[in-house]
Amino acid sequence: MVKIDESRCMGCGICAGICPDGIEVIGGTAKIKNENATCIKEAAASCPRHAIILENTESSQNAPLYDRRSGLGLRMRGRRHRRGRR
């Protein structure tokens, strides 16, 4: 399931530019046009205000696919990245 947090959305249109099949901006706010569009995850990742919320519908808890506090995908949370070392 995909939701737009309208209190966070500033209507910049970045998401609609990345995913025109899934999202459109109406009246200065992003709206879901097709939550099954293949580009929805990329559009959600591009949102500067993290207003696009992707929920895992297979889980009984409907946990978000990214950490709202850090803005990172759950795959990234808790991992340390090496920079310049091998």
Image: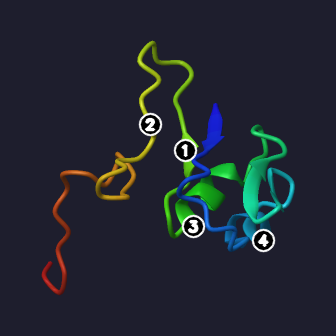
| Tag 1 residue | 53
In the rendered structure, which disc, 2 or 3, sits on the residue that comes first in sequence? 3
Q: Nearer the viewer, mark 1 or mark 3?
A: 1
| Tag 3 residue | 46
Neighbour tally class for label 3: few under 14, some 14-19, many 20 plus, Cα within 10 Å? some
Neighbour tally class for label 1: few under 14, some 14-19, many 20 plus, Cα within 10 Å? some
Please name whichever residue, 68 or 80, is drawn nearer the observer in this view of the structure. 68
Dot 1: element: strand
Give the Cα separation between the discs numbered 2 and 4: 23 Å
Q: Would residue 57 appear left or right of 63 to someone viewing this image?
A: right
Give the Cα separation between the discs numbered 1 and 3: 12 Å
Residue type marked 2 = Pro
| Tag 4 residue | 17
Residue type marked 4 = Gly
Residue at 75 percent of width and 39 percent of height: 35
| Tag 2 residue | 64
In the rendered structure, which disc, 3 or 4, sits on the residue that comes first in sequence? 4
Total labels drawn: 4
> Percent from the top left, x then y, of residue 9?
60, 60
> Percent from the top left, x then y, of residue 44?
59, 56
Quadrant housing the C terminus: bottom left
Residue type marked 3 = Ser
1 and 3 marks in contact (CB < 8 Å): no
Residue type marked 1 = Ile
Residue at 45 percent of width and 40 percent of height: 65
In the rendered structure, which disc, 4 or 1, sits on the residue that comes first in sequence? 4
Dot 2: element: loop
Residue at 31 percent of width and 55 percent of height: 76
> Percent from the top left, x then y, of residue 21?
86, 54
In the rendered structure, which disc, 2 or 4, sits on the residue that comes first in sequence? 4
